[in-house]
Image (cartoon, rainbow, N blue to C red):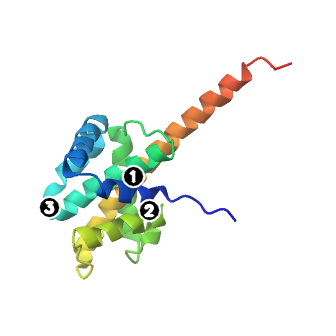
Amino acid sequence: MRKEYDHIADSITQYMGMSPQEQGQMVARVMEDQPFLMGFLTNIAEEFSDEQHEVLVDSVMILLNAFIAARMPVGIIPGPALEEVITERTEAYADADSLLPEVSESPKVFQDLRNLAIVKADLNVDDPAAMHNYNVVLDILITAIERMADYEQRQVDKTEKENSKWKAPRK
């Protein structure tokens, strides 16, 4: 049985091993490359402690690195697509009976990144409201990035399939 490679765990290790300067440079690049997503994070900064907000930004960097490592492109997440994810994930958490990771579309990724916040930002698991807000935002970030990566991968696959139709058969 072949074990799947854990791009998230590897990306967490790589990102946390970067110097603060390298992390800052990466954040600056992503601010340019993902204006809507990073604008969303900037707009909600006051709702979290500095440490919690920093881990949310770290989570975006880690997710993007994981997709790059998996050779999956992540295009610019458009504002309307982000708004759709915000509405959908907020409603999913409002309808949920608990704050379990299973509410997330990607429970393992969610759990890995939430655990990082618990350790790095001292996320207070005893404060249900704070945990709820953090969970919703983290899940919005994960879902938006994963959906864009999925969309981009389907475009690449479609192009490759169309290009393979036009190749002359080998003799």
Disc 1, SS: helix
Can you tell which mark lies on residue 109?
2
Q: In the rendered view, does 168 fall on the left or right side of 26? A: right
Q: Could you say where residue 3 lies in the image, as x and y percent from the top left? A: 61, 63
Q: Residue at x 22, y 73 (%)?
A: 122
- Which of the two discs, 3 and 1, labels the residue nearer the N terminus? 3
Q: Name the kind of residue labelled 2 in the image.
A: Val
Q: Name the kind of residue labelled 1 in the image.
A: Leu
Disc 3, SS: helix
Looking at the image, which residue sits at the far bottom?
A: 126
Can you tell which mark lies on residue 6?
none
> Do labels 1 and 2 touch, CB within 8 Å?
yes
Q: Residue at x 18, y 63 (%)?
A: 51
Q: Name the kind of residue labelled 3 in the image.
A: Asp
- Which of the two discs, 1 and 2, labels the residue nearer the N terminus? 1
Label 1 sits on residue: 63
Q: Is residue 124 above or below residue 27?
A: below
| Residue 153, quarter of the rendered image | top right
Q: Residues within 10 Å of mark 1 (few under 14, many from 20)?
A: many
The residues bearing labels 3 and 2 have C-alpha atoms spaced at a distance of 22 Å
The quadrant of the rendering that contains the C terminus is top right
Let me know if residue 148 appears in the view. Answer: yes
The residues bearing labels 3 and 1 have C-alpha atoms spaced at a distance of 20 Å
- Which of the two discs, 3 and 2, labels the residue nearer the N terminus? 3
| Residue 132, quarter of the rendered image | bottom left
Q: Could you say where residue 101 lies in the image, as x and y percent from the top left? A: 43, 71
